[in-house]
Image (cartoon, grey):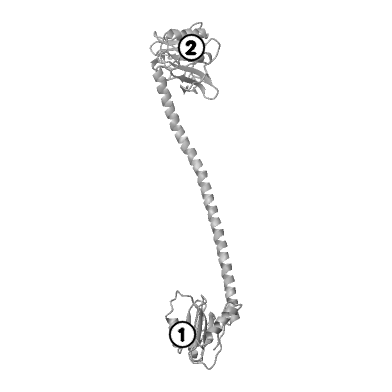
Amino acid sequence: MALALDQVRKIASEERLKETFFNETSRVVSFAPDSPGNARINVYYSTGTVGTCLDHPRQGKTQLFRRKVDLAMLRETFRNPRVHTDRGYQRVKRQRRHQCVICLERDSELKLDCGHDELCIQCTDRLPRDQDGKVTCPLCRRTSAIRREAPAAGGAAAGGGSGGAAADEEVPADEEAAARAQLQRLQKEAADIAAETADVHAIVRGFEKKREDDAAALEQQRQAVEAARAAAYHHEKAAEAAEILESKRSSRGKKLAFAGLPHTDHIKGIFSEDVVCIATDGNATITIYEHAAWAWTPGLPTALHNKLTGRQKTLPRPTIVALGSESRYYIAFADGQAVWHGPGEMASVLLDVALTSLHGGVRSVAF
């Protein structure tokens, strides 16, 4: 968006700004207020870009560029150089930290064509000049032109066009050069920020890792406590179960005494404290154990022998057994079922016991 140069100058005059610099080649014209201050407005009138040079309270000298500025926005910028739009980018002017290499007292203010800029105005004025006004650089001894000078007494500073920049101001570059300089600065800042971000991220990650490690350690402690509680609980339950089992074994008896029975050694071999029931008919002896197993000596009634040897292990275990003369027997199982061989009235007797018993059925049988 090009701006008419005469219109730019007209608006600047209406807003009481003075023209301080003009370069037709770079298509830039600069203005500054009549009152003392550090504000300078560079108008790149061929593209509609406006650069405002200001003293930032934290960043020092800065230049804020606004693109595609129309005449109305230009007037607003002339009135308030600090006004912001959403079409700008900022360039921070390099802050000088060098002292003049001659006097070692004042800050350097000028730059020579050779590239050295460690000279103040007063010392530069004392340097001898050739017929073209060039000076010999005290550092590299090259004959160089002064690129920036202090204003002459009572007049404008040297420069192209209608005016020049003040000695403590930077001569406006053309817009492309300013944009490229800004791009380089932003790229360097981006690299610095990326490096700093990586460092800060590493610090943050360190704290996160410590929290994760602390949480993992706390979880391990919690699991260890839970495991200890579970082990204590199972130990307690096991102790209770063992106590109950011992009470049952003690109540039914854990020792066996007998006399006059055959297969003495065999009987002694099949008896232990986990026997829940034992029966004999004077010839054969049978035992039933807590773990649902059973054992017998030779001579067991054939019918009972067949019942036990042919019984599947998945069926309910036997709980009560009794033996009698004449191959009589009675055996009950954990599901309440029972089989027997006995007198004819035995069925009615067992039924009567089942119906009238307060303890859930037959506890023992004797023939």
What residue is drawn where x is 50% and y is 46%? Answer: 209
Q: Amino acid at mark 2?
A: Phe
Coordinates of residue 91 in the picture (x, y in percent)? 46, 22
Q: Which residue is mark 1?
A: 304
Q: Amino acid at mark 1?
A: Leu
Q: Which structural element holds mark 2?
A: strand
Decide which of 203, 263 is in the foreground and name it: 263
Coordinates of residue 29 in the picture (x, y in percent)? 44, 11
Decide which of 198, 135 is in the foreground and name it: 198
Quadrant into which the C terminus falls: bottom right
What residue is drawn where x is 59% and y is 68%? Answer: 236
Q: Vertically, is 302 above or below 139?
A: below
State the image quarter where residue 188 is shown: top left
Q: Which structural element holds mark 1?
A: helix
Mark 1, residues whose alpha carbon is within 10 Å: few (<14), some, or many (≥20)? many
Coordinates of residue 176 in the picture (x, y in percent)? 39, 19
How far separated are the C-alphas under marks 1 and 2? 125 Å
- Which labelled disc corresponds to residue 69? none
Q: Vertically, is 104 above or below 231?
A: above
Q: Vertically, is 231 above or below 26?
A: below
Q: Residue furthest top?
A: 154
Mark 2, residues whose alpha carbon is within 10 Å: few (<14), some, or many (≥20)? many
Q: Residue furthest bottom?
A: 260
| Mark before the other along the chain sequence, 1 or 2 | 2
Coordinates of residue 171 in the picture (x, y in percent)? 44, 15
Q: Are marks 1 and 2 in contact (CB under 8 Å)?
A: no
Q: Which residue is mark 2?
A: 31
What residue is drawn where x is 44% and y is 79%? Answer: 311
Question: In the image, which is nearer the foreground, mark 1 or mark 2?
Answer: 1
Q: Is residue 356 visible?
A: yes
